[in-house]
């Protein structure tokens, strides 16, 4: 007998072994997908049955858009009211009032009543500012003699300073005309921003990253704590499920939630003239990085602090300074220099700034730097989180 | 099915388990009986992979517990009810059982499970709204959902009333009859006596003895107790005076307890009649695993 049949037999066995291995591998992949989708299904059921979680993850960013959108849209086109007591009623005073009224941010209301005490009048009429043009002001002006008009205002009112500035502007304009001085140079104000962008456009990127970070941090902490305390986590570790499946299912759900919250934030921002052209596919990458970064932080917190109250307190301590100081909510140029350095400690700073650069078409060298830092932070924090998460008792 | 030899566990140099060895056979109902803190839960935790042992050899269904790949195979064929386990609060009973079932390659039909565990009426009730005994039953259903060959139950009836306990016992005996191997821990002597084929008595991390409940009772507590209740304390004092010369007497509340090793029931009756001492009740009590535990450890179980 030759060796041929034996070698064929061995070949057949090898082929069968290989086929079996492939079969086992495919079976384990399918089982893994089944368990992950099962876990995502349960997480979503739990989510939709918990009104407080829905509020914090979805309604909260919408409220922020509505609140800040309303504030910003007011500051873009402010329309102040100015009450004027015209005691002169001359052509000159009427001309001055008309010039004030024609300025883009001011509507003038000429009051008919006699004002005896300006202070009392302001209080009684609940106004912050009153301009008084004295009797014979026009005649004195026409005699080429100086004559003042008076502004009474509440110094605590944030609007009054802006109104005074407008009055001063109109006053200077009129003085130049009366004195017939030739203006040698003027000032043209232009901005570097792309045409069509408003405050809401630069606000939305930061807001999206705030929503993403809070969703990832709080839902991450919430699920981990609940599952640890109830014993669900230990029980999961006793099933054929892998730890990565548990982490991945949570991560996928958080990304879905972050995408829903971001979409809602953008949709509501459209009410305030948000430029839809700012939406870019690469935004999804930053949303994923945001969830990775903050769920990594959540996993680390859960490992370091065992007391549930302590974990929640620590998470608030982490997220609030980031929201306030990373430039996501408040523009960085209003910060003193030392706070600018502090802002650079926070992962949210890099995420928000990169998102802002991306959405406002400022893909500069700085964008790539912040993008690189965001990427590194996301992977490092997430990987540390995975390593420190223990679903066994030891 | 389960072979454990020389299992040891120490935490911070404190010995929790010392030289634990035992075997559990296929289809057997095996119980670990011991007070709280005796190491029962630690044994289950180690067997199912929640804790690491310090030393020892463990095989389950022929698989090596220490080999991660083989441990995965073990996890596919075991069911576990950890102590104080709660499942998802916001999910219904049915959703919870389905969730855990889908983590395995095979599972019982959900309706069959609800029927077996008498949860049909509560199938759509949220878990958090269930009373404690039903929550425990859901936990048990989850432990059995994957048609396991071996089920590990860590004190499954703790905190349940007598009626609920009996319901759980019936369910467990039903699964045992169908061939499932059951490994259970308890601190109640009655449970292994009713349920177990064999029981291991554990105390301070050490197995004192292993055997069937009948064997252990025969080995360590051949006699029962005679409990006498009296109509008055005077009668009781007279009885103590009369009987204590013949046998040691234990006074518990208004009763006296005498070991039937020392004196027969007839001798006691004769002595009380002769002295004209009246009693209200006389009970003979067979020995229990609780007595075995006392004999073996010199201590009482904390939950009898």
Image (cartoon, coloured by chain):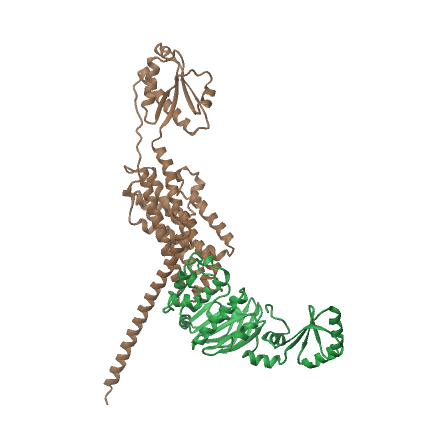
Chain colours: A brown, B green
Q: Residue at x 35, y 42 (%)?
A: A204
Residue B132 spot, x, y in % from top left: 50, 61
Give the position of the C terminus of chain B as an image quadrant: bottom right
Residue A128 spot, x, y in % from top left: 43, 25
Residue A44 spot, x, y in % from top left: 38, 55
Q: Residue at x 31, y 23 (%)?
A: A102
Place residue A43 in its image quadrant.
bottom left
Decide if residue A234 is on the left or right side of residue A185: right
Place residue B117 in its image quadrant.
bottom left
A133 and A31: which is toward the camera: A31
Asked if residue A70 shows in the view, the reply is yes
A217 and A368: which is toward the camera: A217
Decide if residue A347 is on the left or right side of residue A102: right
Question: Is residue A76 depicted above or below B56 in this figure?
Answer: above
Give the position of the N terminus of chain B as an image quadrant: bottom left
Asked if residue A376 shows in the view, the reply is no
Decide if residue A340 is on the left or right side of residue A29: right
Q: Residue at x 36, y 22 (%)?
A: A108
A141 and A72: which is toward the camera: A72
A227 and A178: which is toward the camera: A227
Q: Farthest residue toward the bottom?
A: A1
Q: How many marks?
A: 0
Question: Is residue A177 depicted above or below B175 in this figure?
Answer: above
Residue A293 spot, x, y in % from top left: 40, 53
């Amino acid at each position: 007998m030759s060796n041929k049949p034996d070698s064929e037999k061995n070949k057949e066995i090898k082929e069968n072994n290989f086929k079996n291995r492939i079969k086992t591998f495919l079976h384990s992949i399918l089982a893994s997908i089944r368990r992950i989708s099962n876990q995502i299904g349960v997480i979503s059921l739990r989510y939709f049955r918990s009104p407080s979680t829905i509020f914090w993850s979805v309604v909260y960013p919408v409220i922020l858009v509505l609140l800040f959108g309303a504030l910003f849209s007011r500051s873009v086109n402010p329309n102040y009211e100015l009450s004027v007591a015209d005691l002169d009623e001359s052509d000159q005073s009427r001309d001055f009032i008309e010039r004030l009224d024609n300025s883009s941010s001011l509507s003038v209301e000429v009051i008919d009543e006699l004002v005896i005490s300006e202070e009392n009048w302001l209080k009684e009429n609940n106004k912050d500012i009153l301009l008084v043009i004295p009797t014979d002001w026009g005649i004195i002006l026409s005699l080429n003699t100086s004559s003042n008009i008076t502004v009474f205002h509440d110094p605590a009112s944030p609007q009054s300073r802006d109104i005074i500035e407008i009055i001063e502007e109109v006053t200077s304009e009129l003085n130049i005309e009366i004195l017939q001085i030739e203006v040698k140079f003027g000032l043209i104000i232009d901005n570097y921003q792309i045409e069509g962008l408003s405050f809401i456009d630069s606000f939305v990127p930061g807001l999206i990253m705030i929503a993403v970070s809070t969703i990832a941090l709080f839902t991450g902490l919430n699920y981990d704590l609940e599952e640890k305390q109830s014993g669900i986590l230990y029980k999961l570790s006793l099933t054929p499920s892998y730890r990565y499946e548990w982490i991945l299912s949570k991560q996928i759900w958080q990304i879905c939630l972050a995408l829903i919250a971001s979409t809602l934030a953008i949709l509501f921002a459209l009410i305030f003239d948000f430029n839809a052209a700012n939406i870019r596919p690469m935004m999804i990458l930053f949303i994923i990085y945001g969830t990775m970064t903050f769920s990594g932080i959540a996993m680390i917190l859960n490992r370091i602090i065992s007391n549930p109250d302590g974990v929640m307190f620590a998470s608030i301590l982490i997220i609030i300074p980031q929201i306030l100081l990373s430039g996501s909510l408040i523009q960085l140029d209003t910060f003193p220099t030392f706070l600018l350095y502090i802002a650079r400690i926070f992962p949210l700073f890099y995420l928000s700034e990169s998102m802002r650069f991306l959405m406002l078409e400022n893909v500069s060298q700085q964008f790539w730097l912040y993008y690189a830092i965001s990427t590194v932070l996301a992977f490092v924090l997430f990987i540390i989180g995975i390593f420190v998460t223990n679903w066994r008792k030891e | 099915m389960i072979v454990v030899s020389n299992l040891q566990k120490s935490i911070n140099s404190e010995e929790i388990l010392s030289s634990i060895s035992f075997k559990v056979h296929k289809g057997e109902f095996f119980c670990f009986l011991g007070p709280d803190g005796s190491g029962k839960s630690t044994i289950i935790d180690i067997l199912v992979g929640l804790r690491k042992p310090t030393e020892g050899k463990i095989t389950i269904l022929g698989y090596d517990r220490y080999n991660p790949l083989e441990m995965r195979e073990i996890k596919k064929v075991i069911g576990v009810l950890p102590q104080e386990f709660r499942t998802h609060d916001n999910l219904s009973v049915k959703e919870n059982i389905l969730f855990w079932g889908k983590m395995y390659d095979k599972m019982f039909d959900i309706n069959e499970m609800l029927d077996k565990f008498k949860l049909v009426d509560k199938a759509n009730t949220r878990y958090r709204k269930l009373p404690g005994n039903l929550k425990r039953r859901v936990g048990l259903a989850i432990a059995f959902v994957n048609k396991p060959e071996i089920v590990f139950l860590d004190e499954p009836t703790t905190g349940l009333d007598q009626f609920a306990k009996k319901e759980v016992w019936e369910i467990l005996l039903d699964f045992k009859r169908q061939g499932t191997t059951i490994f259970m821990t308890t601190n109640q002597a009655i449970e292994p006596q009713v349920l177990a084929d064999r029981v291991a008595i554990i105390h301070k991390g050490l197995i004192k003895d292993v055997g069937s409940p009948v064997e252990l009772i025969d080995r360590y507590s051949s006699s029962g107790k005679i409990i006498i209740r009296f109509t008055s304390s005077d009668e009781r004092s007279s009885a103590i005076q009369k009987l204590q010369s013949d046998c040691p007497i234990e006074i518990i509340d208004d009763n006296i307890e005498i070991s039937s090793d020392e004196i027969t029931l007839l001798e006691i009756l004769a002595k009380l009649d002769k002295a004209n001492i009246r009693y209200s009740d006389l009970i003979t009590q067979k020995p229990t695993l609780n007595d075995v535990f006392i004999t073996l450890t010199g201590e009482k179980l904390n939950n009898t």
